[in-house]
Amino acid sequence: MKKDITFNDVLEIVDSLPDNQRETLIEIVKHRLIEERRDKLAQSIKEAKEEYAKGEVRKGSIDNLMREISKWKQMGC
């Protein structure tokens, strides 16, 4: 059976590491977060391009967008 590890457990484990390993861990986590954000952005761009190709997007000004948002808010959406 796998033991659940709490956030506090992780912090205690990290605190027990030597300084150089903690610094390496920080760099690894930072790079993973950057890659994750990059992947999410790439996926969002891909989806936007697909929607555009299918004609599922509308063009308009910022004012038009704000009016549309206001309408949706008034409808309770």
Image (cartoon, grey):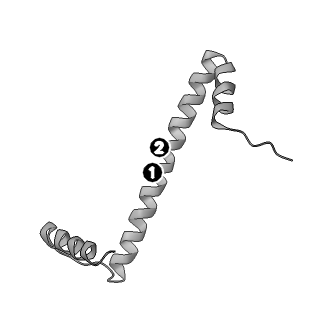
Q: Look at label 2 and name its amino acid.
A: Ile
Query: What residue is shown at x 33% (from left), y 81% (from top)?
Result: 56
Q: Position of residue 21 (x, y in %)?
A: 64, 22
* Label ID, residue 72: none
In front here: 5 or 44?
5
* Label 2 sits on residue: 34
Q: Examine the rendered structure and indicate whether residue 6 appears above or below residue 47.
A: above
Q: Position of residue 71 (x, y in %)?
A: 22, 76
Query: What residue is shown at x 64% (from left), y 21% (from top)?
Result: 15
Q: Position of residue 31 (x, y in %)?
A: 51, 38
Query: What residue is shown at x 59% (from left), y 26% (from top)?
Result: 24
* Label 1 sits on residue: 38
**Is residue 28 shown left or right of residue 41?**
right
In front here: 27 or 63?
63
**Is residue 32 shown left or right of residue 45?**
right
Q: Examine the rendered structure and indicate whether residue 18 appears above or below residue 37.
A: above
In front here: 42 or 11?
11
Q: Position of residue 58 (x, y in %)?
A: 25, 78
